Image (tube, rainbow, N blue to C red):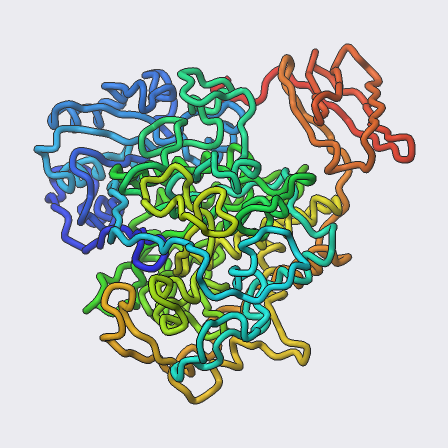
Amino acid sequence: MKFGNNILLLASLLTVSLASCSVDERSLDAETSEDKVSQTVAEALPGQLFVKFDASVSRILEDAGLTKSGADSPASRSGVLSVDEVLDLVEGYQIERVFPIDSRTEETARHEGLHLWYIVRFSEEYPVDKVAADLSKLGEVNRVEYNRTLKRASDAKAVPFTGSHSKAGVSQTGPNDPLLKYQWHLVNNGSAQQVPVEKPENAVAGFLEGADVGMKKVWENPDMKGHPSIIVAVLDEGVCFSHPDLKASMWVNEGEELRSRIDADGNGYKGDKYGYNFVQNTGVISTDSVYDTGHGSHVAGVIAAENDNGIGISSIAGGSPDSPGVRIMTCQIFAGAYAGTLLDEVRAIKYAADNGAVVLQCSWGYISGAANPYDWAPQFSTDDQWTGSNMLEKKALDYFVHHAGSPDGVVEGGIAVFAAGNEYAPAASYPAAYPDYVSVAATAPDFTPAVYTNYGTGVTISAPGGDQDYYYEYGVGHDKGAAGCILSTIPSNTAIEFDHVVGAEGVAGAYAYMEGTSMACPHVSGVVALGLSYAAHKRIHVKATDVIQMLYDSAYRTSDGKDPLREVCSVDENKIYYKYVADQGTVHKSSLKLSDYLGKMGHGQVNAYNFLKAIASEDAGQPMTFPNVFVKTGAMKAYNPDLYISGSNYTLNVENESIASVEYREGKIYVKGLKAGQTKASISTGTETQEFIITVRESGGGNGWL
């Protein structure tokens, strides 16, 4: 997986032959059994495999107690005799469910077949591909896949903010954050103040007005702001929840406490107050290792650093001291020297959906199949290639896309936003390239494609990502490596040595510059979150698929209707830059032909203001009213009344109080089921009344999980 420009990536995967067995060894022929095994095995972790069981043995697994298995309590037998016979031969056999039970969503998980996925562990002395081949021959096994380690490709560090970089010339019509003037990616005025020196001859246009995400007009409209009901899950390194510019924006799982050994909310994870550290299986989010890059906090800052608090940076969808904005859920899949695995990744994706996230921020992916093989190890080139090796990963993402959000909430379905990749390749990497997800390419401050960005097939939209190789000559001294890059938050408690820069303006925590499609990605995640927030403020219900289309249709156009990305790529010019400039200076002078990118940067550059206008249009969604409630006897459901009705003084009424109770406390309305039945209820603010039906059932499902 890659974070930033050469920050993180999955280790290269090479296709190798699986061990085969003759037809008479098993009842299934070799071709059929091989089709049940993941197509890739190189870099597979030894001594472990993912196994998806056939639904016909679901009851056997339950009777053996496997539904309660997990990282803290693996089982030693599956109860499926044929599987146990194979695995008894490889010693040290343990098995656990991939996705812990969350009683709130278990019925949905079962409907999607996620309850049938297990991870088995055995002695590393036995070839993992041979064990996979043996298991694939069993009729009780539907699929076998390999677990892999997520690896960093380099130890590249962010460039520290020192206060002497070029300014973006932003007027203070927006938030009062002192570092906003360095954030060209939010508001790019294209003024001469942006650069301390003459425009280098290799620059096409320097800095251009509008080469940003369109926040200037957003800030001119007070109702276009973040909303705390919108949660963005950041799958990355941990997010520093104590950073002064981030702490007010963190999602908080009420009732959970850090370092707790109790799963207070029954979601399968203990102590997950701000999210979860899936690498180390703990609710303690770590950001202070010498091996951390600060990437997770940097991404989070772009999306939701607190605005108008007089310190640090501004963000796209963050709140202010007087008005809370979107929330950041940290789903940690890297932790210092400890690398996460595919197991950690898929658990993080489902966790995000189950706990309220509606935007999945994914600045990671595999190497593009179109990457230059002399520099990279190309991987997946087609949808079939990716899904053929990563069915479990695809199923987890399907779960988020289809089941995040709520039919009763602002958005139905989830939106997964991926970085397109940094291999200079004419095709996006996977999973970004898959049609169900938003795939983000990176641009420079003059609308030109960033020199490293992937483009072409699979790219759906572009956003500012920085371009230090191109803007290197704009910098001065130590700041050369930051010119034209993205400024955001870095952990305050990080081991990175530049967190306390004496004399740097506006430094209350730590701030630094990074670049990459992984920096373009959170700009789009932030804009999506801001648009959903606007829908929440307007009390509009939308569908995720419609939101994605509106995002594309609202891409930036100039006043005369032209696409500046297309225009800049229409010129017969080369873009000159210095490859590897951060490490080697101006040794490797390179160029890219702009016309090669013509029409290949997706639908254009993302624009927050245009997107919010589209969200508010008459045909964008449906007005929200207080929903009908379905609840189990003895259970309780909570609702945010502000999403459905204006006002703050609520009068609540239940026609039959023996069936259900309704009360308002601490900003939420709680509906509790008392006995099976159905009753009418209403909520009123004096000027408006909304009626709804409460249905109470004895059981939430018939699958035995209750």
Residue depicted at x 27% and y 23%: 80
Q: Nearer the viewer, residue 278 or 82?
A: 278
Residue 51 at what x, y percent from top left?
28, 35
In the picture, measured across the screen, residue 39 lies left or right of residue 571, that is left
Q: Residue furthest left?
A: 125
Q: Nearer the viewer, residue 80 or 401?
A: 401
In the picture, measured across the screen, residue 550 lies left or right of residue 525, that is right
Residue depicted at x 57% and y 51%: 314
Residue depicted at x 87% and y 32%: 689
In the picture, measured across the screen, residue 263 lies left or right of residue 57, that is right
Residue depicted at x 57% and y 36%: 248
Q: Is residue 301 above or below residue 520?
A: above
Q: Nearer the viewer, residue 641 or 620?
A: 641
Q: Residue furthest bottom?
A: 572
Q: Can you see residue 395?
A: no
Image quarter of residue 78: top left
Image quarter of residue 228: top right
Residue 207 at what x, y percent from top left?
51, 74
Residue 122 at what x, y percent from top left?
17, 28
Q: Residue furthest front?
A: 503
Q: Is residue 180 above or below residue 274?
A: below
Q: Is residue 54 above or below residue 422?
A: above
Q: Can you see residue 169?
A: yes
Residue 400 at what x, y percent from top left?
49, 42
Disc tally is: 0
Image quarter of residue 333: top left
In the picture, measured across the screen, residue 254 lies left or right of residue 375, that is right
